[in-house]
Image (cartoon, rainbow, N blue to C red):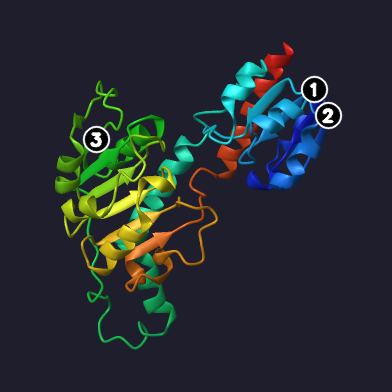
Amino acid sequence: MNIVFLDTKTVGDVPNLEDLKKLGDTTFYQTTSPDQTGERIKEANIVITNKVVLDRDLIVGAENLKLICVAATGMNNIDRDAAKKAEIPVKNVSGYSSNSVAQTTFAMILHLVQKVARFDEFVKSGNYAKHDIFTNQEITYSELNGKRFGIIGLGNIGSKVASIAEAFGAEVVYHSTSGRNLDQPYHHKELNDLLKTSDFVSIHAPLNEDTEGLISYPQLETMKSSAYLINTGRGGIVNEADLAKALDEDLITGAALDVFEQEPMNAENPLLTVKNKHKLVMTPHIAWSSIEARTELIAGVMENIKKFLGE
């Protein structure tokens, strides 16, 4: 089998990446631009892609293609109708990042709420050494215990986040964006009710017609002024210009984002010029990518290929 992995840079240096070579003649590309894709896949039997787009023309033009493996859960970069018409299976990997995303979610929350970075800077700047008492009560933080944690999208990741929130002593409620996931051990709330009453709103939903632009200025106005918004789901769910405005107007206390409408983010993104920068923490779409999660992802890709090969 001729195997081509189009964007290995997206998974980084994982210990089992080279194991793909055991399954066939494997070529690794760090990145692949749109004008390079056709040439690189034209002789391939199996193509692995994380984010490289495979549209109809590319799929039709790859006459030897027998399997498309997505090194991710989302498959929006694949023309699945074209693949189906060409009788080419498309296989993704799910469930590998639940622990990683949940951990990152709370790392971001604690960064905002606990304010460790600000206390750390107080000490390292030498100000603590000059201080007149043994502690610092000028910077205030609060506990998660007793707060309401509103989760938008209670799938595998949302459920993991819910269990951690409960361990901190928080009350968990949730909103199903599809309206179908209602058999859960937590109270389901309509979106406005969840936004109005939650101290933390954490998004773990897919991006689709139900969720695109779900959180815009009117929804941010609904939230408590003391609330925090966290998005480790998909960037297009939150209107970034509206969020920047809401933060500058103190409509909410803080926000944490790991995903963006455009990735990498546009240099003109209004979130980069938020006035009160301590109210906002942003990471470059890394919540999914602990070394354990990335290793499990590659193992999942390998398993999909082995099943296809009948091993």
Which residue corresponds to the image point at 37% horizontal and 57% vertical from the top-left? 240
State which tag comes first along the sequence, 3 or 2: 2
Which label was assigned to residue 64?
Answer: 1
Please say whether residue 10 is visible from this viewpoint.
yes
Residue 205 occupies which quadrant of the picture? top left
Q: Nearer the viewer, residue 160 or 213?
A: 213
Tell me which label, 3 or 1, sits earlier in the chain.
1
Disc 2: CA contacts within 10 A as few (<14), some (14-19) or many (>=20) = some
> Disc 2, disc 1: CB below 8 Å?
yes
Q: Amino acid at mark 1?
A: Asn
185, above or below 11, in the image: above
Question: What residue would you read off at disc 2?
Answer: 43
Answer with left or right where residue 133 lies relative to residue 36: left
Sooner in the amino-acid sequence: mark 2 or mark 1: 2
| Residue type marked 3 | Tyr
* Cβ atoms at labels 3 and 1 below 8 Å apart: no
Q: Tell me the element at label 1.
A: loop
User: CA–CA distance between discs 2 and 1?
Assistant: 6 Å
Element at badge 2? loop
Residue located 15% across and 47% down the image: 196
Mark nearer the viewer, 3 or 2: 2
For label 3, the residue is 174
